[in-house]
């Protein structure tokens, strides 16, 4: 009597399912996300500025209003804006750019507790992996402006400073907005990190501390007076 082949097909189906969770297949998924996002971002013609900051900042607060103004001022200066696409500072900067009829790019991230994309995006790209998203932020930025934020903002801030310090990217303006918020961080950098020789004195020159949207964009334009450039090193 012929042997039934039902169970064999079921085992093959399980193998297929398990394969999708193997590291080799995960690499293919990572590569696919890199290719898709790079292809999407290279089609955007404007020079872009990344704006980081807390998702917890509420509409109508001074921080929200400042980030909204920075988005508007960037568009008026000829730039587009990249944010994480979520609420708070991200929404404010996106909104300022969007309302000024400029380019507002949202690099959204898929989270277990879903992040709802803000409605002020002319372009939107979704990511599964945080690290690919961070590569896109830096690869397509001509400057970085950082508003107050929590662990996520500190992660993005540290990543950019590390890349600048180690010269893995071209030098771009790196601007912290809100002196009151960042003063403690800067004191710690000087009194502990520098004091213990964990960084060099010249590393402090990587950071520009300002107190307003106007100062941030004026400093950016001064840095780019001979023309903006991206972060990618040309060998």
Image (cartoon, rainbow, N blue to C red):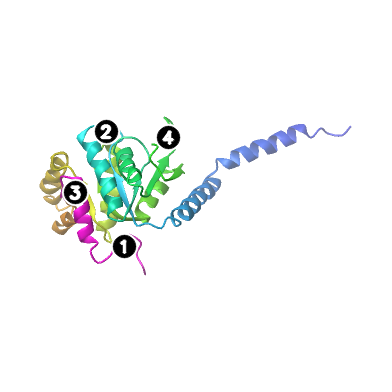
As measured in the structure, the alpha-carbon distance from the residue carrying label 1 to the one carrying label 2 is 31 Å
As measured in the structure, the alpha-carbon distance from the residue carrying label 2 to the one carrying label 3 is 20 Å
Q: Is residue 224 magenta?
A: yes
Residue 19 percent across, percent down from the top left = 60, 42
Quickly name the residue at label 1: 229
As measured in the structure, the alpha-carbon distance from the residue carrying label 4 to the one carrying label 2 is 19 Å
Q: Is residue 41 above or below residue 147?
A: below
Quickly name the residue at label 3: 214
User: What secondary structure is marked by label 1?
Assistant: loop
User: What secondary structure is marked by label 4?
Assistant: loop
Q: Quadrant of the C terminus?
A: bottom left
Quickly name the residue at label 4: 111
Q: Earlier in the sequence, mark 1 or mark 4?
A: 4
The quadrant in which residue 83 appears is top left
- The span shown in magenta is 209-235
Q: Are marks 3 and 4 in contact (CB under 8 Å)?
A: no
Q: Earlier in the sequence, mark 3 or mark 1?
A: 3
């Amino acid at each position: 009597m012929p042997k039934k082949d039902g169970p064999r097909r079921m085992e093959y189906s399980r193998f297929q399912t398990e394969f999708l969770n193997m590291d080799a297949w995960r690499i293919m998924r990572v590569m696919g996300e890199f290719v898709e996002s790079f292809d999407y971002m290279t089609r955007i013609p404007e020079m872009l500025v990344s704006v980081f900051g807390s998702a917890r900042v509420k509409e109508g607060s001074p921080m929200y209003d400042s980030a909204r103004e920075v988005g508007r001022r960037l568009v008026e200066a000829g730039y587009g804006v990249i944010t994480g696409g979520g609420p708070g500072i991200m929404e404010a900067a996106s909104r300022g750019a969007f309302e000024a009829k400029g380019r507002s790019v949202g690099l959204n991230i898929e989270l277990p507790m879903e992040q709802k994309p803000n409605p002020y995006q002319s372009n939107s790209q979704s990511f599964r992996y945080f690290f690919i998203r961070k590569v896109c932020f830096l690869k397509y930025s001509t400057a970085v402006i950082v508003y107050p934020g929590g662990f996520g903002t500190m992660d993005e801030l540290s990543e950019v400073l590390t890349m600048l310090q180690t010269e893995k990217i071209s030098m771009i303006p790196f601007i912290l907005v809100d002196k009151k918020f960042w003063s403690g961080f800067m004191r710690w950098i000087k009194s502990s990190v520098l004091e213990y020789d964990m960084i060099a004195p010249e590393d402090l020159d990587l950071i520009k501390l300002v107190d307003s949207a106007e100062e941030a964009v004026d400093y950016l334009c001064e840095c780019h007076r001979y023309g903006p450039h991206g972060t990618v090193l040309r060998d």
